Amino acid sequence: MQQPCLYVKSFKSEYATDSDNIRKVFKQARQSAPCVLVLEDIDSLLNDENRSFFLNELDGFASNQGIVTIATTNHPERLDSAISDRPSRFDRKYHFDLPEFPERETYIKLWNDKLNSGMGLSEEVVSRIAALTEGFSFAYLKELFLSSMISWMGAMETGALEKIMISQVAILREQMSSITVSNKNLEN
């Protein structure tokens, strides 16, 4: 039997405070229990103003029985130790390395299989793109497909997607480098 899954990408809204929205999320999870509560990029969800309220909802007096809470982050170093190191909060941590060539190739094939025949890539091109994307996360591979498909819509030529994707690899690699440099500057 499949359990409900609540997926949270933000606590921000125009008409309510973060605390109001955190309360609503946990209320919905409690009403849906048993359920899975997924907090995407927890490092960006929490700040100095809402952290205490969040922690009280997570393990305060209210019962969260039947709720499995999963949080993701690309930046565990940005998390407050009250979140990352306290037992019974997020005490199981799983690190996922960047995908190697076989995983990238499989992921690219999955996306390629969804394309219409005018856009589709040959097996040789799929392998070439997989080789060119060394160091790409699955998120960047997805962005590679989405941005390339949008660019392809301007040309709509059979075979044009390959050229577009190769140029997009370079653009995304440059973006990845600038983000890495920015993050290093923030750390210093």
Image (spheres, rainbow, N blue to C red):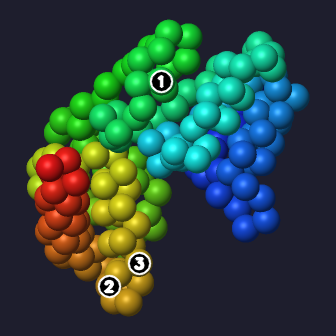
Looking at the picture, how far across and down is residue 107, in whole percent?
34, 44
Q: Tag on residue 157?
A: 2
Looking at the image, can residue 108 be seen? yes
Residue furthest out toward the bottom: 154
- Residue 112 lies in what quarter of the image? bottom left
The three-letter code of the residue at mark 3 reads: Ile
Determine crowd level at label 1: few under 14, some 14-19, many 20+ residues with C-alpha closer than 10 A: few
Looking at the picture, how far across and down is residue 24, in whole percent?
80, 42
Determine crowd level at label 2: few under 14, some 14-19, many 20+ residues with C-alpha closer than 10 A: few
The three-letter code of the residue at mark 1 reads: Ala
Task: Identify the mark nearer the N-term, 3 or 1.
Answer: 1
Nearer-the-camera pick, 18 or 139 = 18
Residue drawn 62% across the image and 28% down it? 55
Residue highlighted by disc 3: 150
Residue drawn 61% across the image and 52% down it? 10
Residue highlighted by disc 1: 82
Q: Tag on residue 131?
A: none
Secondary structure of the residue carrying tag 2 is loop
